[in-house]
Amino acid sequence: MRETTAHDPETGDHDRPKWLISLERNQCSRWREIRTKKDVRPITYLKSKTAELVREVSEKRRPVIITQNGVAKVVVTDIETYDRWRATMALLKALAQGEADLERGRTVEQPDAFRRARRAIERAARDG
């Protein structure tokens, strides 16, 4: 069987799906590429021009990295981008959990899965 999990030396995590490690590294390298000089601002800029920064981030939909003493500390992003990021992370987590279940043999046949799903939907509708 091919190895699908690995130790991630960057985070120290063990048994993480290789595809997830690769995706995170790719996303991190893409993130570094967008850091132009105007994407990075000192915390004093945030303090003195908060409304301007919020307007800029909302209109351009580009995150801005806030530094403190020259070190990146936080990211300011618009709410739509944040919501998409959260949805993407939830999907990636579900995929990783599904892959782990598959590797450990925790599976059910399709008819049983659909039956369970229908029952859960009916319970949710009933309990309201």
Image: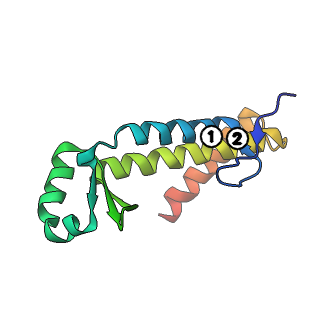
Can you see residue 73? no
- Is 44 left, or right, of 94 in this rendering? left
- Is 36 left, or right, of 74 in this rendering? left
Q: Amino acid at mark 1?
A: Leu
Is disc 2 surrounded by few (<14), some (14 to 19) or many (20+) residues within 10 Å? Answer: many
- Is 101 left, or right, of 93 in this rendering? right
Distance in Å between CA atoms under marks 2 and 1: 5 Å
Depicted 23 relative to depicted 77: above or below: above
Foreground: 47 or 20? 47
Q: Secondary structure at mark 2?
A: strand
- Quadrant containing the N terminus in the rendered view: top right
Is disc 1 surrounded by few (<14), some (14 to 19) or many (20+) residues within 10 Å? Answer: some
> What is the image's colouring?
rainbow
**Would you identify the image quadrant in which residue 74 lies?**
bottom left
Identify the residue shown where x is 42% and y is 47%: 85
What numbered label is drawn on residue 54? none
Foreground: 120 or 43? 43
x and y, in percent, of residue 76 in the image: 30, 58
Q: Residue furthest right?
A: 1
Q: Amino acid at mark 2?
A: Pro
x and y, in percent, of residue 126 in the image: 52, 60
Foreground: 108 or 12? 12
x and y, in percent, of residue 39 in the image: 27, 48
Identify the residue shown where x is 36% and y is 68%: 69
Identify the residue shown where x is 70% and y is 47%: 8
x and y, in percent, of residue 10 in the image: 65, 50
Disc 2 vs disc 1: Cβ atoms closer than 8 Å? Answer: yes
Residue designated by label 1: 20
**Would you identify the image quadrant in which residue 11 lies?**
bottom right
Residue designated by label 2: 17
